[in-house]
Image (cartoon, grey):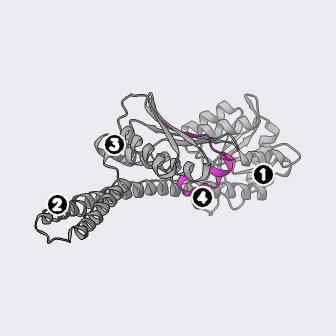
Amino acid sequence: MSKNASGKLVEILLVEDNPADARLIREALAEMAEVSFNLECAGTLSEGLSRLGEGGVDLVLLDLGLPDSDGIETLTRVRTEMPAVPIVVLTGLQNDAGGVEAIRQGAQDYVRKERVDGRVLARSIRYAVERKKAQRRLEAYQTRLRSLASELAVAQERERRRIAIELHDRIGQTLVFAKMKLGELQACIPAGAEDKLSGMQGLLDGMIGEIRSLTFELSPPVLYELGLEAALEWLAERIEQQYGLKVELHDDGQPKPLGKDTRALLFRAVQELLVNVARHAHAGEARVSIWRESDFIRIEVQDNGKGFLSDEVLSCAGERDLFGLFSIQERAAELGGELKIKSSPGEGTQAVLTIPVTRTWRAKRRE
């Protein structure tokens, strides 16, 4: 154990099967002045994973060539078992290629054994620990942002429904009542005024129609009264009327228990995907399929449009018109699901949204 006044001990696990290299690392660690540490050693990956499973390890110094594992697979197995523990890879290669690849695969840093000394190790350990802390903070922020995005989407949908109900119950019904009263006047109006009265009735009819249309656009009542499948049928008809895009809907007929908030989010996701197809895909037809697989609901939106490079689009999905895709991804992740998009130029696009049946947004939030 190394002692100094620099602060908390760093519990280090060295996984190295070569006694000479292990001794070299021990000597280099002993030279460190600014890092307080306690060192434990393991000669195989199995021993190392067993020690990690006991907890209390702050950092792993990992040789990738072990008797029971070799190469990047060694790093992958440690990261899979203990993703929260920072890893510094020890490489015997005479170049940096192996170390760079290790960082790409999730290591916090790497050290070439030929260059090991106290200064290099101290820098690497300090860097690895701080980088892992920063990564954890970033992941916590991302989780919180995803949760806030879902809360915002739910609040937005509820506000849409509230406004739609107000439009229907107050303004819409008031206009209908006004039309009825205007009709009663027809029996007692002077000769020659019929045309003006008919014009006013036409205006009222137009306003009533606009209110009804706006109410459905804001929050289609069919979604809450008849369910997701019926709402998607209405949406398919609406998209064809608005954009001329023919939309076929296929449902497997199985029960799909979903909370109101989850149904609304799924409906908006399909709406976003279909509008994207209508506006950007140059497609003549689209197909929406909804089916249940065990505890998951899958919704597929497929078109015969021009397609695109899906990897490039998803990597910049937060930009401009593509923000809708990013939003769907975040909402799906918050529900415990995912959005996958497959496309290539000239081959159309397939978007598959997967959501657990048994995990509503509220259940996820309580966790």
Q: Quadrant of residue 196?
A: bottom left
> Which residue is identified by label 1?
28
* Residue, disc 2: 180
Q: Residues within 10 Å of mark 3 (few under 14, many from 20)?
A: some
CB of mark 2 within 8 Å of CB of mark 1?
no
In the visual, does 70 lie left or right of 208?
right
Q: Is residue 52 left or right of residue 267?
A: right
Front residue (pair 200, 223):
200
Residue 75 position in % (x across, y down): 70, 39
Question: Which of pointers 2 and 1 indicates the residue nearer the eye?
Answer: 2
Residue 47, percent across and down?
65, 32
Q: Earlier in the sequence, mark 2 or mark 4?
A: 4
Amino acid type assigned to the residue bearing label 3 in the image: Gly
Q: Earlier in the sequence, mark 2 or mark 1?
A: 1
Q: Nearer the viewer, mark 2 or mark 4?
A: 2
Region of the chain picked out in magenta, as a range: 298-325
Residue 170 is left or right of residue 149, and the answer is left
Distance between the Cα atoms at labels 2 and 1? 93 Å
What kind of element bears circle 4?
A: helix
Mark whose residue sits in front, 1 or 4: 4
Residue 163 visible in this rendered orientation of the protein: no
Q: CA distance from mark 2 to mark 3?
A: 39 Å
Q: CA distance from mark 3 to mark 1?
A: 59 Å
Residue 259, disc:
3
